[in-house]
Amino acid sequence: AQSVAQPEDQVNVAEGNPLTVKCTYSVSGNPYLFWYVQYPNRGLQFLLKYITGDNLVKGSYGFEAEFNKSQTSFHLKKPSALVSDSALYFCAVRDGYKLSFGAGTTVTVRA
Amino acid sequence: NAGVTQTPKFQVLKTGQSMTLQCAQDMNHEYMSWYRQDPGMGLRLIHYSVGAGITDQGEVPNGYNVSRSTTEDFPLRLLSAAPSQTSVYFCASSYTQRRYSTDTQYFGPGTRLTVL
């Protein structure tokens, strides 16, 4: 089975600083990886996905993710965080007919 | 497009009661699914459907039933509610989820269910 792990429950950064949310994966075959964001009391919103090709994937709201095959990682990044980026972030991997999600990382951006 | 809609937004049940969570999408998506979200556990798949008339179990199907009579609707039924089913439930859809499909799944706003 495919799986992902998010090693940090919480990430705190100051507004304007770089933001990184970590994700590692374990798959057999080619990984299809996703990042979703959940704002308070809202559903999940798609940010970006890695299928194949460039290791740097650009997504919504200024986010990007770097796929690293040797480190089996797919970290989410934003060069300059905003207070409005405060949310719960999920990494996910395609696993047959479903997505397997990580436990989530709560991001708090302080003004 | 309204996207994926879910009703109700909130629900409180007593142990043993039954109810149906509604999910609808207007994007003509083949694939629909139900997840539950519990703190520290991410989202776990309950049931899914790859088209009208076709459903299958996910990771945590016990205590839930589904049916898919139309492309648009995918209701989730709790047969006899238990406190362990207190959770937030999300419906999701995508064009297809064939085995190695890379289609993006779109999520509804969720239903927060409390079972007393």
Image (cartoon, rainbow, N blue to C red):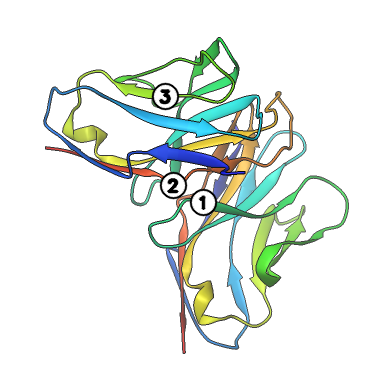
Crowding around mark 2 (Cα neighbors within 10 Å: few <14, some 14 to 19, many 20+) is: some
Tell me the residue at 71%/51% (across/down). A49
Q: Quadrant of residue A27?
A: top right
Mark 1 secondary-structure assignment: strand
Relative image position of residue B111 (x, y in whole percent): 35, 42
Which residue occupies the extreme right position in the image? Answer: A53
Q: In this rendering, would A51 be left or right of B87?
A: right
Relative image position of residue B115 (x, y in whole percent): 17, 36
Quadrant position of the C terminus of chain B in the picture: top left
Q: In this rendering, would B25 be left or right of B41?
A: right
Dot 1 and dot 2 residues touching (CB under 8 Å): no
Instruction: Compute the Cα span from label 1 to label 2.
Output: 11 Å
Amino acid, disc 2:
Gly
Determine which residue is flagged by label 3.
B75
Q: In this rendering, would B105 be left or right of B103?
A: left
Q: Quadrant of residue A51?
A: top right
Determine which residue is flagged by label 1.
A44
Crowding around mark 3 (Cα neighbors within 10 Å: few <14, some 14 to 19, many 20+) is: many
> From what the image shows, is residue A61 above or below residue B13?
below
Q: Nearer the viewer, residue A76 or A111?
A: A111
> From what the image shows, is residue B65 above or below residue A49?
above
Which callout, 3 or 2, points at the residue further toward the start of the chain?
A: 2
Report the chain holding disc 1.
Answer: A
Q: Nearer the viewer, residue A55 or A38?
A: A38
Amino acid, disc 1:
Leu
Q: Nearer the viewer, mark 3 or mark 2?
A: 3
Q: Which mark is residue B42?
A: 2
Crowding around mark 1 (Cα neighbors within 10 Å: few <14, some 14 to 19, many 20+) is: many
Q: Are marks 3 and 2 on the same chain?
A: yes
